[in-house]
Image (tube, grey):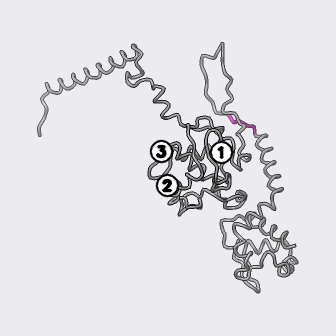
Amino acid sequence: MFRFPKLYKFKRLSLIVLLVAAFATTVVNAKVKGVGHYGYGKVATAEEIAGWDIDIRPDGRGLPPGSGSVEDGEILYEDQCASCHGSFGEGVGKYPVLAGGEGTLTEERPEKTVGSFWAHTSTLFDYIRRAMPFPQPASLSDEETYAITAYVLYLNDLVEDDFVLSQDTWDEVAKLPNNSNFVPDPRPDTQAVRCMKDCKKEVKIVSEPTITAEEVAAADDTIVKAAAGNENEKGASVYNGACAVCHNSGVAGAPKLDDKATWKARLALGEATLIKHAIEGFQGDAGMMPPKGGRMDLSDEDVAAAVKFMLAEAE
């Protein structure tokens, strides 16, 4: 087996010591000269910062110069976007749906689109500008981004077909229909108090709850009361998402919701019995109700709410 001579080992160790000393000297000199923490890099120029500073605020601050019409956006959308999002914003495969979904946010499976859920048009513009089209993100010009944004707004019936989006018309569409349902989080980011003089020399970092146990209990009580007040709304949502497929059409003998004659005999059984049948399943003369309608992901409370909604509608 080949072995290095002892003299070679000594030279190699000496070389390592010299390299470490030289690196330490370079770092110290860099700190002394104020070149930077490790002596490399430079301060970013205004031009370099501008290349990354492309965020758009909800009020339109930060928008680039330019404009784009719905008419131009339609052509661009068909060429760049329709293959994934559909010609009418309906979505293709598992790609996001962009249009429609109005009034579905309270349903079990809400359809969150630009028109039904989003709060600000700036989010749409910024997302298209940074990430679209999917195969070539950030390849669109500012004018193309304006135009496609305008067309997506048009698909959601938020602007007319002759609309032109620009800095001048931004205020007309800055807020989307669901904007009022977005509220700021009132909780503070920190409980610390800014120190301007006589500051502490040592600061102990601790983790503390931002609200008291009493405040949590009060909030829970409010939620319970709100849930009770919206029980009928919850029942309607569960019904539309899980029950309507059978009870709207009478599939497999399911009593149709609007067939009051059929429901009359069922109403006589009482609410508790009907809820029990819906949760556990029931074999009737006209058909069979599987437990929870086959939707075992639903809680007993969900099923009970749906039954109460159906009974209220059938009365």
- Kind of residue sitting beneath label 3: Ala
Q: Nearer the viewer, residue 105 or 233?
A: 105
Residue furthest toward the front? 162
Which residue position holds label 1? 120
Judging depth in this view, the residue of 76 and 269 nearest the camera is 76
The numbered mark, 2 or 1, whose residue comes first in the sequence reads 2
Q: Which sits in the foreground, 257 or 157? A: 157
Q: Name which quarter of the figure residue 28 lies in.
A: top left
**Which residue lies at the image location 25% right of the left edge and 20% below the top edge?**
18
* Residue type highlighted by circle 1: His
Q: Do the numbered discs 3 and 1 sit on residues whose CB atoms are within 8 Å?
A: no
What distance separates the C-alpha of mark 2 from that of mark 3? 12 Å
Inter-mark Cα distance, 2 to 1: 23 Å
Residue bearing mark 2 = 80
Comes first in the chain, label 2 or label 3: 2
Indicate which label's residue lies in the foreground, 2 or 1.
2
Give the secondary structure at mark 1. loop
Name the amino acid, label 2. Answer: Gln
Q: Position of residue 76 (x, y in %)?
A: 52, 53
Disc 2 element: helix
Task: Give the magenta-colored segment's residue range.
Answer: 208-212
Among numbered discs 3 and 1, the one appearing first in the sequence: 1
Task: Look at mark 3 in the image and give the residue it sits on.
Answer: 138
The answer to whether mark 2 and mark 1 are in CB contact below 8 A is no
Q: Nearer the viewer, residue 153 or 127?
A: 153
Magenta stretch, main secondary structure class: loop
Count residues near mark 1 (Cα–Cα under 10 Å), then give few for <14, some for 14-19, many for 20+.
many
